Image (spheres, rainbow, N blue to C red):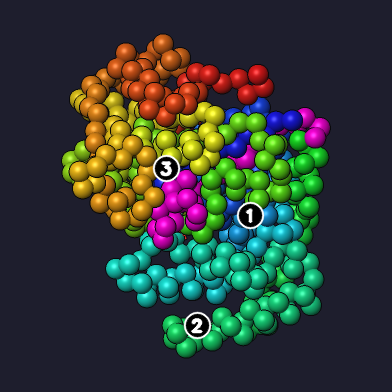
């Protein structure tokens, strides 16, 4: 039995794609368990760069079975486009399995995502406008259409009719937007159905059978802990559960199947979209991190907000995910700095908060308490062993480890898969 979960420990874009691709070499399955095409996972493998939104990052390996679990919301148009792109690139997608229970993103979900953001004005969440929130909303209100509905036109039509009777009223009367007919959406989606049908599977059974046979399953998270609908900075979150528990519900496996939970964090921190961000840097250092780190969104191209590493957030991620290991990425981006700050606690109205405050007002106004450490001012992109790193870089990792009380097992020093230090990692040990 070997189930390994990888979750973002911050606000997403920590380098999940790169690390999943790297570790997938030792795995038999790579499974996505939540989110949708709001995710953008970058992989640089064998000289080519792939940007994946829905397809699991293990797709590069012929020995991997990539799986899209029931917890994912799927825009079939985007899925097929992504499959076409991979095939055009010489990568086979025939092994891809898609849960029969995953929900579908419908055209009106995209419209409603954009319209609701517009209505919120200054209070907008800054969503990716891919229809993610409205699709999960319909799942919860039991008005959603699922992948298995693509296999039966009669059922598809009946469910769509029920959904449209509500959605058309909202589109027309609240947002003054065009409405849809059952015929036009059915025609479009039945076109996708032909191609998706061979991939549809009972993925919970497939994954459980694999685990029972001692195969290795890697659960690839999307987004990050602070974007979690329950544990994140609500309402500035996504609409799914990117934390480790989401791997169980989003695939249909029991918690005892999970052996290891990796939390991935940048050596600093970024956020896309609105919401509180205690260590945000609106200065030259923030500019430098954006420039050197190439901090522009993989999905929407938006500039990512940058800030100092926040150990309070990581301790929280350790807690809510039960992290067994930390993976620190983008250490190389800090090489240009003379000194580096790490937020060790917050201050609010004269009180020190060592842990993430439960009350949003405190988090919104939290003032970071920093520990300042010297930088290393040296190119580290060629380092492959921990001992190769300059002393100050090793000490920086040591500090992050002490603050998290979890070992830093993998360190990334560049975007390509070789630019990685496997410090305490032997997947099959
Ligand atoms: P994900 O959403 O968590 O998969 O992360 P993204 O792919 O959206 O963003 C991470 C970006 O950082 C990508 O452009 C990666 O190629 C890049 N990256 C990953 N690890 C490193 C690293 O250690 N150093 C540098 N410089 N870039 C990295
Ligand atoms: P990966 O998997 C970073 C953010 C959006 C917005 C909020 C809600 O690449 O790390 P949504 O469209 O999900 O309703 O938007 O969540 N967001 C992400 N930020 N990385 C992501 O994915 C994200 N997916 C959603 O910017 O603030
Ligand atoms: Mg991303």
Q: Earlier in the sequence, mark 3 or mark 1?
A: 3
Tell me whether the residue at label 3 lies in contact with that at label 2, contact meaning CB atoms closer than 8 angstroms. no
Tell me whether circle 3 and circle 1 mark residues in contact (CB < 8 Å). no
Front label number (3 vs 2): 3
Q: Nearer the viewer, mark 2 or mark 1?
A: 1
In the displayed structure, would residue 187 be above or below residue 355?
below
Mark 3 lies within 8 Å of ligand 2 (Cβ measured) = no
* Residue 421 in magenta stretch: no
The numbered mark, 2 or 1, whose residue comes first in the sequence reads 1
Quadrant containing the C terminus is: top right
Q: In what element is the residue under mark 2?
A: helix
The residue drawn where x is 71% and y is 43% is 254
- Residue 180, percent across and down? 58, 83
Which quadrant of the figure contains the N terminus? top right
What is the C-alpha distance between the residues marked 3 and 2? 34 Å
The residue tagged 3 is 10
Start-end of magenta stretch: 212-237
Quick check: which quadrant has ligand 2? bottom left
- The disc placed on residue 171 is 2
Residue 71 numbered mark, or none: 1
Percent of width and height locating residue 390: 32, 14
């Amino acid at each position: 039995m070997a189930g390994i979960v990888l979750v973002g420990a911050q606000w997403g874009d920590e380098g999940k794609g790169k690390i999943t691709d790297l570790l997938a070499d030792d795995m038999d399955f790579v499974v996505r368990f939540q989110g949708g095409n709001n995710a953008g996972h970058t992989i640089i493998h064998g000289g080519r760069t792939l940007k994946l939104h829905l397809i699991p990052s293990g797709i590069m390996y012929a020995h991997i079975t990539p799986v899209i679990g029931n917890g994912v919301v799927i825009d079939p148009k985007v899925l097929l486009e992504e499959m076409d792109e991979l095939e055009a690139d010489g990568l086979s997608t025939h092994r891809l399995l898609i849960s029969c229970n995953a929900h579908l993103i419908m055209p009106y979900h995209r419209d409603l995502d954009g319209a609701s953001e517009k209505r919120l004005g200054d209070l907008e969440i800054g969503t990716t406008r891919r229809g993610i929130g409205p699709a999960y909303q319909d799942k919860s209100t039991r008005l959603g259409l699922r992948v298995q509905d693509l296999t039966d036109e009669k059922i598809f039509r009946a469910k769509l009719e029920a959904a449209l009777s509500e959605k058309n009223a909202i589109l027309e009367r609240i947002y003054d937007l065009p409405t849809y007919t059952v015929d036009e959406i059915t025609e479009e989606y039945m076109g996708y159905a032909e191609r998706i049908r061979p991939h549809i599977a009972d993925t919970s059974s497939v994954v459980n059978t694999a685990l029972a046979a001692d195969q290795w399953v890697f659960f690839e998270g999307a987004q990050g802990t602070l974007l979690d609908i329950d544990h994140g900075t609500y309402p500035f979150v996504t609409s799914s559960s990117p934390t480790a528990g989401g791997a169980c519900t989003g695939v249909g496996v029991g918690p005892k199947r999970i052996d290891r939970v990796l939390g991935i964090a940048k050596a600093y921190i970024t956020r896309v979209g609105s919401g509180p961000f205690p260590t945000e840097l609106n200065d030259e250092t923030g500019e430098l991190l954006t420039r050197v780190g190439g901090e522009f969104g993989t999905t929407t191209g938006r500039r990512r907000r940058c800030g100092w590493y926040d150990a309070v957030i990581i301790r929280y991620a350790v807690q809510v995910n039960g992290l067994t290991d930390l993976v620190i990425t983008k250490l190389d981006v800090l090489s240009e700095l003379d000194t580096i700050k790490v937020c060790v606690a917050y201050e609010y109205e004269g009180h020190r908060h060592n842990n993430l405050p439960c009350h949003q007002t405190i988090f919104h106004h939290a003032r970071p308490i920093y520990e300042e450490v010297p930088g290393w001012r040296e190119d580290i992109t060629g380092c492959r062993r921990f001992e190769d790193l300059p002393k100050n870089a090793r000490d920086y990792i040591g500090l992050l480890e002490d603050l998290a009380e979890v070992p830093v097992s993998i360190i990334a020093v560049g975007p390509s898969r070789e630019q990685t230090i496997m410090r305490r990692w032997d997947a099959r040990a």
